[in-house]
Amino acid sequence: MRARGHTVMDAMHAAATSTTPAPAFAEVPVGTAPMARLRPFLPADGFEDLRRCAVRTRTLLADRSVWSVNSAASGGGVAELLRTLLPYWRGCRANARWAVVRGTPPFFRVTKRLHNWLHGSRGDGGDLGAAELALFDRVSALHADALARQVAPGDVVLLQDPQTAPLVAPLKKLGATVIWRCHVGADCPNVRVHRAWEVLLPRLQGADAVVFTRPSFVPAELDGFGTHCIAPAIDPAATKNRSLPPRLVAELARGMGVVRGDPRASTWVAPAEVISDGPPPRPGIEPIVLSLCRWDRLKDPTGIIDAFAETIAARTSAHLLLAGPAVGGVEDDPESADVFRTVLARWSGLSIEQRRRVHVVCLPLADVERNAAMVNVLQHIADVVVKKSRAEGFGLGVTEAMWKRRPVVATAVGGQKDQVEHGRTGLLVDDPDDLVTFGAAVVDLLRHRAFAARLGHAGRNSVRSRFLPDHHFLAWSRVFESVLGQA
C-alpha cells in the first residue's frame, strides 16, 4: 500500500477524535454570477425565457432575503448545488444567503439514520426511538434560536433534507415563508421509509411548500399538499464542469498522481492521496473506469471493486479509480470512516494483480475550487464513469460525466432513471446486486468505442436540454410564485 501526502489512516483517526463545534450555524459566503454567463450554453429562446424569469423573480422577492439552510458546506450534492447555483440568484439581485447548521456526532448519527431510512436502507442498524428524536429536536432548537437572530419576518427559508425538518415550526412562528426541500426518497417504500415519514411529517406541519426530486418520492400523506418536483442541475460554467484542453488535462492528472508520468507543479490541483500496489494507468493504453462519490454504503463502493475484479479486470486491461472525498471531510456523514475501512479491507483482499489495477483515491476538501478542478480532471480522463448506487435521489456525478461526454453505466434507481435513457444516453443495470451484468456493461463500452462515443454525445445533449440552471431557476420561480403570490 502506498499513499501520497498525509496517510488516510491519520485522517480517519483525526475524524474519529475531533470535537465538533457547539451546535449553532455558520453562514457561508455566496458569490455573484451574472445570468449572462449561461448564454453560451443555452439556445437563444431559452436564455430569453431565463432573463424574463429573473426579472419576475427579482420583483417577487423584492426586499426579502432567501435563506438556504443545510448541514454541510462541502462534500455532498446539496452543498454543490447551493455553491454553484445560488450565485445566479444573487446575479439577478435576489438576496440569496446560505447557512449551515452545525451539530454533534450523535446528532448527525440520528440524521444520517433518517437519510438512510428515507432510502429504505437499514443504515447503521440503529433505532429512531424516543431518545434519538429527543436529541434531534433538542439540537434543532439550538439551530432555530441561532437562525432566529438572522432571519427576518417575510424572509423565505429553504430548508434542505431531514437535518432541518424541525426548523419549520419555529421559523414559521418568526414570520418567515418556509419551504422544505427533500433530495432523497424511495421508489418502492418499505417499513423503514414509512417510519422515517412518521418522524418527519409532524415536524413539517405548517410548511408553505415541500419540494421533491421526483414524484415517486412524495409520500401518500402529502398528496394534495403544496408539493413540487425539481430536478437538480449543474452549472456548465463552474470549475467542475468547464471544458479543458487535452494537454492541460494530462498535465493536471499527472500532478494529481492518478495517471503515469512526471508530475508538474500546478496551482489548479494538489496531489491526491492514492492507495495502490502498482503504478497509475497510462492514458490511451490502459482504459480508466472511474467511480466518484462519497464513502457511503448506498453508493456500494465494495460492489464496484467486486464487479471490477470479477468481470472488468478479467476481460480488459482497464484500471479502476475509486475516488471520494478525504475521510472525515463531510461534516454531516458520520459513517464515512467505517465505510472507508470496509473499502480498504475489500481492496486488501484482492489478488496482487488486481490490487495493481485498483487505485483508491481521496481528494482534499479544504479548498473547494481546487477540489472541483480535481473532480473535473478525473471525469475528463475517464473512459467510462460508473455509478452503482443501491439507492439514489439524483446522481449529480452522473450529470457531470454526461456533460463531459463520458459514457455512463449506472444502476436503475431513483433519479438515475430520469437522468439516463438506457441505450441512448448511457447504460442502466436494473439490479444493483447483479455484478456480472454491471461489469459486462462496462466491458461493452470499453470494447465498442464508437457506441460509447455516441452515448457520450447524446448524454451531453440530454443534460443541455434538461439539467442546466435555466430549468432549475424557472422551476424555483414557479415555487416562489405559488407561495408568495403573483407580483
Image: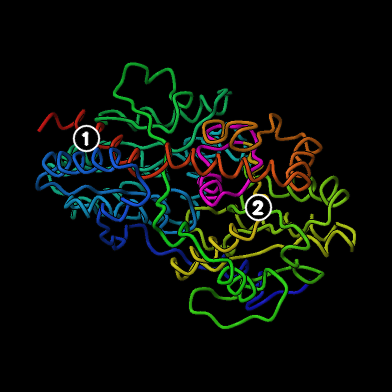
SS assignment at label 1: helix
Q: Nearer the viewer, residue 17 or 367?
A: 367
Q: Nearer the viewer, residue 42 or 346?
A: 42
The reply to whether residue 309 is visible in this rendering is: yes
Within the magenta stretch, is there residue 140? no
Percent from the top left, x then y, of residue 187?
55, 25
Percent from the top left, x then y, of residue 9?
67, 70
Check whether the beta carbons of the residues at disc 1 and disc 2 lie within 8 A of each other: no
Residue 352 left/right relative to 51:
right
Q: Residue at x 54, y 69 (%)?
A: 364
Residue 231 left/right relative to 418:
left
Q: Nearer the viewer, residue 239 or 133?
A: 239
Within the magenta stretch, is there residue 401? yes
> Residue beneath label 2, please?
291
Q: CA distance from mark 1 to mark 2?
A: 36 Å
Find the magenta span and give its range: 391-415
Q: Residues within 10 Å of mark 2 (few under 14, many from 20)?
A: many
Percent from the top left, x then y, of residue 108?
48, 50
> Residue beneath label 1, please?
480
